[in-house]
Image (spheres, grey):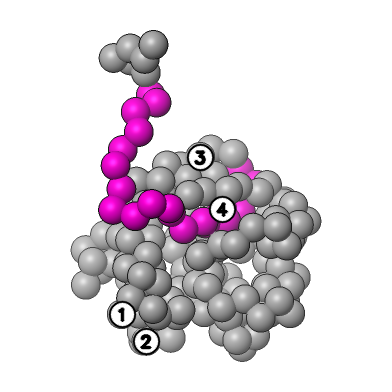
Amino acid sequence: MPTRSSPLRPQLTDTLWRRGILVLDDDAAVRRTICAIADRAGWASITAPSFAEAESLLGTENFGCVVTDVAIEGIPVDGFLHTLADLCYTAPVLLVGAGGAALRNAAADLAFRLGLNTCHPIAKPIELATLAIRLSRIDTRLQAGFTGCCSRDCHWHKAAEVEPETPARAAE
């Protein structure tokens, strides 16, 4: 029987199912954090610690969004983005990374050139409010029938990044 300290407390949702989100990062703590935020934003998270494992999941699961680090164990995300493009993946791809803005933007530029719906990348350490707002916006757009990214803060709708992203900018 659950007690007050039990973390297992189901929450009612407006829908009978939740969209799947693939969380890809080699750091387990980052994966857990992203999953916790995604869960609160209404997503059902599945994690992968490597590109190979993520690629195998793409063939067995239906994801409404992919959140991936720009490099896993020193390997750039480029090959994984090519795999998504080869599969004609249409759902939003959200890139996160600890490198400089140039590294994140280069990965987003590649994804865009490959025809992927790439959201504006998020820097690590991840601002939790920024991620929550972004995932909620993506979910809202998908529910409305838009398959593209999260729109107003999209990498392709902005001028070059001059200042770091904050929750206030993400909410605009």
Q: Are marks 4 and 1 in contact (CB under 8 Å)?
A: no
Q: In the displayed structure, does residue 168 sit left or right of residue 147?
A: left
Q: Are marks 1 and 3 in contact (CB under 8 Å)?
A: no
- Number of numbered discs visible in the structure rendering: 4
The answer to whether residue 49 shows anywhere in this view is: yes
Question: 93 or 27: which is nearer to us?
Answer: 93
Q: Are marks 3 and 2 in contact (CB under 8 Å)?
A: no
Q: Secondary structure at mark 2?
A: loop
Question: In the drawing, what numbered circle is on residue 157?
Answer: 2
Part of the protein shown in magenta: 7-27
Of the two numbered discs 1 and 2 on the same chain, state the one appearing first in sequence.
1
Q: Are marks 1 and 2 in contact (CB under 8 Å)?
A: yes
Question: 35 or 77: which is nearer to us?
Answer: 35
Q: CA distance from mark 4 to mark 2?
A: 24 Å
Q: Residue at x 59, y 39 (%)?
A: 28
Of the two numbered discs 4 and 1 on the same chain, state the one appearing first in sequence.
4
Q: Are marks 4 and 2 in contact (CB under 8 Å)?
A: no
The answer to if 4 sits in the magenta stretch is no
Q: Position of residue 27 (x, y in %)?
A: 60, 43
Of the two numbered discs 1 and 3 on the same chain, state the one appearing first in sequence.
3
Q: Position of residue 49 (x, y in %)?
A: 68, 47
Amino acid under disc 3: Arg
Q: Is residue 66 above or below residue 45?
A: below
Amino acid under disc 1: Arg
Q: Position of residue 44 (x, y in %)?
A: 48, 49
Question: In the drawing, what numbered circle is on residue 23?
Answer: 4
- On-image quarter of the C terminus: bottom left
The answer to whether residue 128 shows anywhere in this view is: no
Of the two numbered discs 3 and 4 on the same chain, state the one appearing first in sequence.
4
Report crowding for label 3: few under 14, some 14 to 19, many 20 or more residues within 10 A (C-alpha).
some
Q: CA distance from mark 3 to mark 4?
A: 9 Å
